[in-house]
Amino acid sequence: MGFTMGLNMLLLLAMVATNLLSLYHLSSTLQSRPPAPPPVPDHLLRQLHTIRATINHLTRLNHPTPAATTVKPTKSPTPSDLLIYTHLSPIASACHLHPDLLHAYMTYSPFSLCPPDPNNIAETLILRGCHPLPRRRCFSISPHKPQSSLSSHPFSPLPKTWTQKYPNNGFDMESEKDKFVAYKTDLDLPTSQLFRIARDSGFSIRLGLDVGGGTGTFAARMKVDMNATVVTTTMNWGAPYNEAVAARGLVPVHVPLQQRLPVFDGVLDLVRCGRAVNRWIPLAAMEFLLYDVDRVLRGGGYLWLDRFFSKGVDLDRVYGPLIGKLGYKKVKWAVANKSDSSGVKNGEVYLTALLQKPLSK
């Protein structure tokens, strides 16, 4: 009965969306008849697509394909824990766009061990905007022999299994310990210089957030040299970044870039955006991120874009004006050519910018 009512509601929404599209086209033809009709707004198309996809998926779950056909039948009904979750908290709309991934992730036995995730379904869902994940009632699997305990020093060597498997991903402490220390090019900003800039402006840096911080090297350097607390946001796409941050005695936060920063308004002194923040991020997501950074920074706080890369022409026409909308003071603004093969091919540049939020707006 509940399924039928839900399906009827979705069908009604689909009819409304379709009628809106028809009305839109009709209104365009009743006017001055331009040479070509204007395109249908993207948000209407996305809403109609989402509604239709949900209807099709629910229909398949309620009416499995007969075994006689060559089409592979649906594996099982909607997992019970997913249905329970929907009564407790709304599921991110992006989850509905990936029903097969969501179904696979939520198929588990409550009150038992969580199933292994060799295909990184959780990371895939998060990166597609399905966050927070709805799984709630299973026990995470603890390794019999943990990779490491908390290190006595943030730059102590990590387990060899990590350093050998991920040699160029920030797991080698011999190379990581030299980062954020010396000034070699205009793109560099050593932590000592950062604190000197803050001190000269009468500002103190105590709390910070490192967005896309990998294995947490920036947080480690701030802890060792400046006794400042920095939380690192990172994903586990391709390597155990969260585990590495924790093994160094630092705090990892497992959130994607499109997630609202899990920090209250106006409480941070510094937000650093590492190389994970670059031109591959959709422009709308980039804008939302910048304004969320503004939300969590207190007056006088700093936003540090560390080696943000984009096409040179886009930096001048798109990203520079976008950053300028914040109205922050430019303490440092350094641009250099990106010299690897991709950078040369695409005319890309690096930007290192240190921007200070006004004390009041």
Image: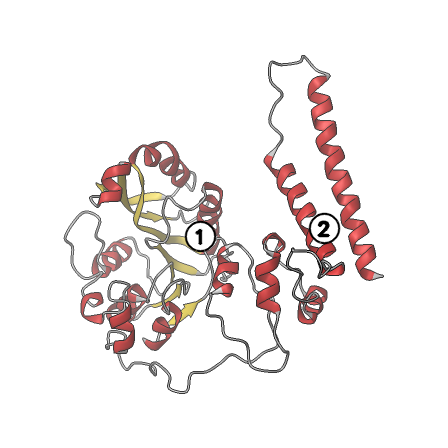
Asked if 250 appears above or below 29 in the picture, the reply is: below
Mark carried by residue 293: 1
Task: Look at 37% across and 50% down and name the residue there.
Answer: 277
Residue holding disc 2: 55
> Position of 115 compared to 308: left or right?
right
Quarter of the view holding residue 204: bottom left
Task: Look at 69% across and 47% down and name the residue there.
Answer: 51
The N terminus, quarter of image = bottom right
> Position of 100 compared to 52: left or right?
left
Task: Look at 74% across and 54% down and name the residue there.
Answer: 59
Does dot 2 land on a helix, a strand or a loop? helix
Asked if 263 appears above or below 157 in the picture, the reply is: above
Q: Is residue 356 visible?
A: yes
Task: Look at 25% across and 77% down and name the residue there.
Answer: 160
Tell me residue 359's x, y (percent).
Answer: 41, 49
Residue type of the residue flagged with mark 1 = Val
Residue type of the residue flagged with mark 2 = Ile
106 or 64: nearer the viewer? 64
> Position of 303 compared to 50: left or right?
left
Q: Is residue 158 visible?
A: no
Asked if 346 appears above or below 114 in the picture, the reply is: above
Tell me residue 155's x, y (percent).
Answer: 24, 74
Tell me residue 237's x, y (percent).
Answer: 40, 62
